[in-house]
Amino acid sequence: MEQSAYKPGEHPNLPPPSNTVGPIAWVRANLISSPTNIVLTVLSIWFLYEIIPATLEWAFMDAAFTGESRDECRAKAGGACWAFIGERFNLFTYGFYPADERWRIDLAFVLLCVALLPVLWDRCPFRKYGLYFACAFPFISGWLLLGGFGLMPVDTDEFGGFMLTLVIGVTGITFSLPIGIILALGRQSDMPIVRVFSIWFIEFFRGVPLITLLFVASTMLNYFLPTGTTFDLLLRVLIMVTLFASAYMAEVIRGGLQALPRGQYEAADSMGLKYWTSMRLIILPQALKISIPGIVNTFIGLYKDTTLVIIIGLLDPLGVGRSSLADTKWTGLSNEMYLFVAIFFFISCFGMSRYSLYLEKKLATGYER
Amino acid sequence: MAEVAVSPQRNAISRLWNDKESRSVIIQIITISLVFAFLAYIIHNAVVNLQAIGKGFSYNFLWQPSSYDINQHLIEYNSRSTHFRAMLVGILNTILVAICGIVLASIVGFVLGVLRLSKNWIVNRLAYCYIEYVRNVPVLLHILLVHGLIVHAFPVPRQAISIGDLTFMTNRGIFSPKPLYEPLFLVVVVLFLLGLAFMWWFRRYAQKVQDETGQHYPVFWIGLGAIVGVPLVSFFLLGSPITWDVPELKGFNFTGGMVVRPEFIALLLALSLYTAAFIGEIVRAGILGVYYGQTEASYALGINRGRSLSLVVIPQALRIIVPPLTSQYLNLMKNSSLAVAIGYMDIVATIGGISLNQTGREMECMIIVLALYLVMSLIISMIMNWYNKRIKLVER
Amino acid sequence: MNESANKSNGNPEREIVIVIRKMHKWYGQFHVLKDINLNVERGEKIVICGPSGSGKSTLIRCINRLEEHQDGEIIVDGTELTNDLKNVELVRREVGMVFQHFNLFPHLTVLDNCTLAPIWVRKEPREEAEATAMEYLERVKIPDQANKFPGQLSGGQQQRVAIARSLCMKPRVMLFDEPTSALDPEMIKEVLDVMIELAKGGMTMLCVTHEMGFAKTVADRVIFMDEGEIIEQNKPHEFFDNPQHDRTKLFLSQILNH
Ligand SMILES: Nc1ncnc2c1ncn2[C@@H]1O[C@H](COP(=O)(O)OP(=O)(O)O)[C@@H](O)[C@H]1O
Ligand SMILES: [Mg+2]
């Protein structure tokens, strides 16, 4: 047998051979490890080469940032016409909200951030008070946006733009979670009638597209109310969106309830806890923790679905954009508009999904310790 | 309540309430009364309201002429057809786009999932960027964007992009030659069917031979030859028994040939590319979810990469993939209702849109629309549940 | 190096199946295996022990290239392990492996687990493959479980199926990576019995295990590894009664006195 250069037990740690580390080895392992791999690499690089320079050129180098109309933009540069977005920016943000009252939206947005902080960040100082504030926030902001009690009343017809997206999204998210929890518990209940109604409710809302529910809200909901009552369109939409989201939420939470080991239920029962106590203290905290990724995905889905309201005539950013395109001054700038709105949605939804990943990781380690 | 529970002298109500059985009965009676009271209330309102404006509740309008046109109809339809027929056209259009979308989304999604698992860094990152971009932007925006691109970026028919003077891409759709079959073409069809039958038999035969002698036939290649090759060769030997009705530019548009409408293309592309991003992540998670020891064990037995994928990894990954895949298929089907935003005539746009507006029968039309979607959801769920049961693992 | 090992290596009548020469392996910057030299003769039974994280699993996984080494050479049955996929396949056919966590295929029955590789790799007729499988299942004493799914068996039964599954490929060498450490005490014996039986049949075996009783009865040689090195190797009685190296002494005192 070969003789080692070192005595047993004294071999030093050596660095790996140079051909297995460093950038060249990385390229060899990750980009050109096999013929298929080489082909894929070449194709991808060619694709990027085709796409990136042209896009950058269009969006920045050859773009016009100022101008009064599409023609003025075109006269300056052949690429994107961002002046359009610039001129309509307020419309995109606030919709048709009276200009003098827009500070109320700004304030509500700041309060939203303040309310979110303790909800999202578990080591936030004064978290307990922050959470109380978060619970009160929907009502405070409702008052701010709608007015009354000393503020000038604003009609919901004038809501629009990103502000409308946030109103629908935040309301839906706030109310769908508790309703979803109740539905999920109902579906797991021992009482057949409660269970059957929960199942019907959930399956109905999951079985039809949101757009049909919005049509129901806009065309026929008034038939079901006492004669003479009129019901704000936005409110009808909010109800439908919330019910729709809570059906999905219920299924996500049911998954969490089922994933809990039977032992947890048995332990809670054996301690003599009442149903609601054991749910509140033992079962739900764990089940909700398990279902966080699904809950956040439902939130993201709901948030994206807010765009559907344009089909029944509400003006969210997409609606504002489309009506702006109808203006002869800016006609034909749909790419700029779609890109702008897409970036807005991308940032918020990507942010939410990153946050859920972060939580998932944190909770996963929390379980191990 | 807690105080009552410990006291020995309970009154009758608290005794009922603290008995598990009777409490459950009480709660259920309350639930059922509340639900029915609510239903009775809204139905009563509806009846009163309908009476007040002098509308009844009747489906007779379904048999009246619709008097509107639908540009894409898979069955005979014109503006003199009934609303009922318009609804059928809408249903078929929804089903068409849903099925095409599901097939396309599955293919693209599977490819995306595999690319996401690729060891090639660039490919992996590209797939990641695509998936994240698509997933985090509303599907309606995708639909409008793709539709806008087709309508704005494609030329008017007069300046159509022509592919060999046979197929023309325009902002009014893609015009392609329509095949007109001659009688001899029947032979090709028969050969194709025979090929299918042969394949069915050959697969069992090959399995039998493999079981008996261990010899492996290249089943895939032989199958390809029988199903595609033979009919193709015979097609040319018979002197191509098809004539083509080539679209021609007449005035401002093409006539003749087949046309695929831009709304259909936009909806199909947007829906399936959107859903594919979700399916890609599902496929990736499914394959990663198969415990790595499974692949190692099959390698250790000398099974090669491809075989270990098809014999060991994929059958197990499917078990993880199918349930979320089902809900993606359902989402795609339901999202197809966004067709109404770009004027593709599906269920919502026909019976829930124009018919509704023309007849003013909101209640009747919306009930039909909701019921149709519920039925379709139910069918997809049933098929996928059946499949899921078949591939379920036996556990202790 | 110690005498007994040299003596057995010097025996000209016995064919050498595995040659490992100056082999090194790194995980990134981490030097896991350092200058491994090892020859294994046909029919030899080797037990590898050492503290957790010392690289035992990595070493035997390099032998059927579940892991790649970066320096030195590994030759199994005359085939050198390189990037050449054909060679890797050749070696994997001849080398069976049993894992700590069994790694049975949960979607296939016990019988299908055993016939999968013979049918798809060795291209055996199904009947023949099934007959062989039943023979080995009988040897591991669970022929009556053949049509059950792995999820329906106990841990000990699963591990015995895993052994039978490897044997169905008629390997020349068997690798065991802590085959009993995921099992309850009463199941350990049933698996060890099967392994002892196998050893008696003349199989070449490399076995990572902490079952010292098994090492004493079966092994021709015990190898002690620490921090990626082979510290000491010897015949079992010498190894246990008269360990040479301080680290070996420490390790033995820890595992024997509890
Ligand atoms: N895939 C891997 N990547 C990085 N380090 C690894 C990997 N697998 C094992 N290691 C490290 O290599 C060392 C040896 O591992 P292993 O061979 O499993 O030890 P043993 O089987 O002796 O307990 C350990 O320190 C372990 O942390
Ligand atoms: Mg180990």
Image (cartoon, coloured by chain):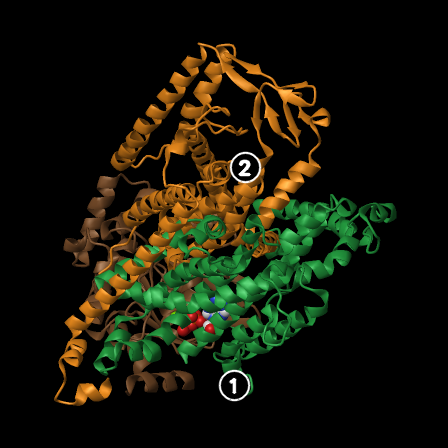
Where does the C terminus of chain A fall, quadrant-wise?
bottom left
Task: Give percent across and percent down for residue A179.
Answer: 39, 66
How much space separates mark 2 and mark 1, taking CA atoms? Answer: 51 Å
Q: Is residue C147 visible?
A: yes
Q: Which residue is mark 2?
A: B344
Which chain is green in the picture?
A: A
**Secondary structure of the residue carrying numbered label 2:** loop
The tally of labels here is 2
Q: Amino acid at mark 2?
A: Tyr
Q: Which chain is brown?
A: C
Q: Chain of mark 2?
A: B
Where's residue C135, x and y in %? 18, 50
Q: Categorize mark 2 by other alpha carbons within 10 Å: few (<14), some (14-19), many (20+).
A: many
The chain letter under disc 1 is A
Say which chain is orange. Answer: B
Residue B193: numbered disc: none
In which quadrant of the rendered view does residue B246 lie?
top right
**What SS does tag 1 mark?**
helix
In this view of the protein, can residue C94 be seen by the observer? no
- When asked about the image quadrant of residue C240, the answer is bottom left
Q: Quadrant of ligand 1?
A: bottom left
Image quarter of residue C255: bottom left
Q: B117 and A60: which one is in front? A: A60
Nearer to me, A229 or A88:
A229
Residue bearing mark 1: A129
Name the amino acid type tagged 1. Tyr
Residue C102 vs B58, above or below: the answer is: below
Q: Is residue A180 left or right of residue A350?
A: left
Quadrant position of the N terminus of chain A in the picture: bottom left
Q: Which percent across, then down, holds residue A153?
A: 62, 68
| Along the viewing direction, whichever of B162 and C120 lies nearer the viewer | B162
Residue at 34% x, 52% y is B43
